[in-house]
């Protein structure tokens, strides 16, 4: 490899566990629309996909209802929900090892970029990342493939020297669409079958295994 390899790292389910804040904010939005609020556990699938796609599925593609739901969700999430969140054990140590090993690290999330920056700062993770990259308020770059393409272009990354790390199939599919390898992680909201079916090149089971998995995957790509 000619340069310092770049790691694009998902946020929700990969760096932090946002279950409480996201599910409560979805419930707030549905309640505001006068719709039934499902049990929180039944909304686990909602963590990972773009917010607009989540509400489209929950609201039968009713465009007006989806737009209102997104606004209601953000109303609560911006004030409270983004910090109803938990840093995943072992993540700071793994990030420190990756950074000191010479990797360039970027947060790459379908979440609004402003929310992602606030969360990264709140958990004192900004020190590990060269940039925080996310979606726009109008929904642009919420699709992971479009977002990864933007990150690659914005930071002049070589896809052959970059790797996407995430817990859902959207991370893997977005990476593959842009010529990047993907490393799946099992401590988030996707499972091994989902990640392998999507085409993950390798799987890390726990955060302490992340640096070794990254090194092994990139060494294989360079061989």
Image (cartoon, rainbow, N blue to C red):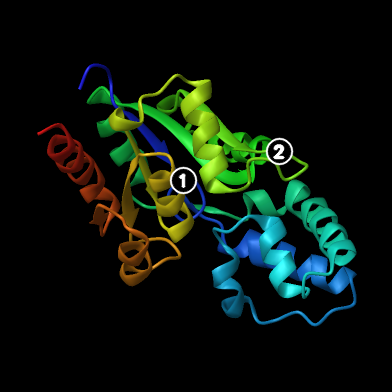
Q: Residue furthest left?
A: 223
Q: Is residue 162 left or right of residue 21?
A: left
Which residue is at a point 79% across and 55% down the rendered structure image? 76
Q: Is residue 220 left or right of residue 178?
A: left
Which quarter of the figure has residue 55?
Answer: bottom right
> Marks 2 and 1, Cα distance to the nearest angstrom?
16 Å
Which quarter of the figure has residue 134?
Answer: top right
User: Which of the two marks, 2 or 1, is nearer to us in this view?
Assistant: 2
Closer to the chain start, of discs 2 and 1, is: 1
Which residue is at a point 55% across and 71% down the rendered structure image? 44
182 relative to 156, above or below: below
Residue 81, x across and y down, in percent? 69, 54
54 relative to 208, above or below: below
Residue 24, x across and y down, in percent? 70, 66
Which residue is at a point 58% across and 59% down the rendered structure image? 49
Q: In this rendering, does residue 150 appear at all?
A: yes
Tag 1 secondary structure: loop
Mark 2 sits on what residue? 136
Mark on residue 178?
none
Residue 30, x across and y down, in percent? 81, 71
Mark on residue 10?
1
Local packing at callout 2 (Cα closer than 10 Å; few below 14, some 14-19, many 20+) is some
Tag 2 secondary structure: loop
57 relative to 184, above or below: below
The residue lying toward the viewer, choosing from 90 and 2, is 2
Residue 86, x across and y down, in percent? 51, 54
Which residue is at a point 33% across and 56% down the rendered structure image? 185
User: Quadrant location of the N terminus?
Assistant: top left
Q: In this rendering, does residue 123 appear at all?
A: no
């Amino acid at each position: 490899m000619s340069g310092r390899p770049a790691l694009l790292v998902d946020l929700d389910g990969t760096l932090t566990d946002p279950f409480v804040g996201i599910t409560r904010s979805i419930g707030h939005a549905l309640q505001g629309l006068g719709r039934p609020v499902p049990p929180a556990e039944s909304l686990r699938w909602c963590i990972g996909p773009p917010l607009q796609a989540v509400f489209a599925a929950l609201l039968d593609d009713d465009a007006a209802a989806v737009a209102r739901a997104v606004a209601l969700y953000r109303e609560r999430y911006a004030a409270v929900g983004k910090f109803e969140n938990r840093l995943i054990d072992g993540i700071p140590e793994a990030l420190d090892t990756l950074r000191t090993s010479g990797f360039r690290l970027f947060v790459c999330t379908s979440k609004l970029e402003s929310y992602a920056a606030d969360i990264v700062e709140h958990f004192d993770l900004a020190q590990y990342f060269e940039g925080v990259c996310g979606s726009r308020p109008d929904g642009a770059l919420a699709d992971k493939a479009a977002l990864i393409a933007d990150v690659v272009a914005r930071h002049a990354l070589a896809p052959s020297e970059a790797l996407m790390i995430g817990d859902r199939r959207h991370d893997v599919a977005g990476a593959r669409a842009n010529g990047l390898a993907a490393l799946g992680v099992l401590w988030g909201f996707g499972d091994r079958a989902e990640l392998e079916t999507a085409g993950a090149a390798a799987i890390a089971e726990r955060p302490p295994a992340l640096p070794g998995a990254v090194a092994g995957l990139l060494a294989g790509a360079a061989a």
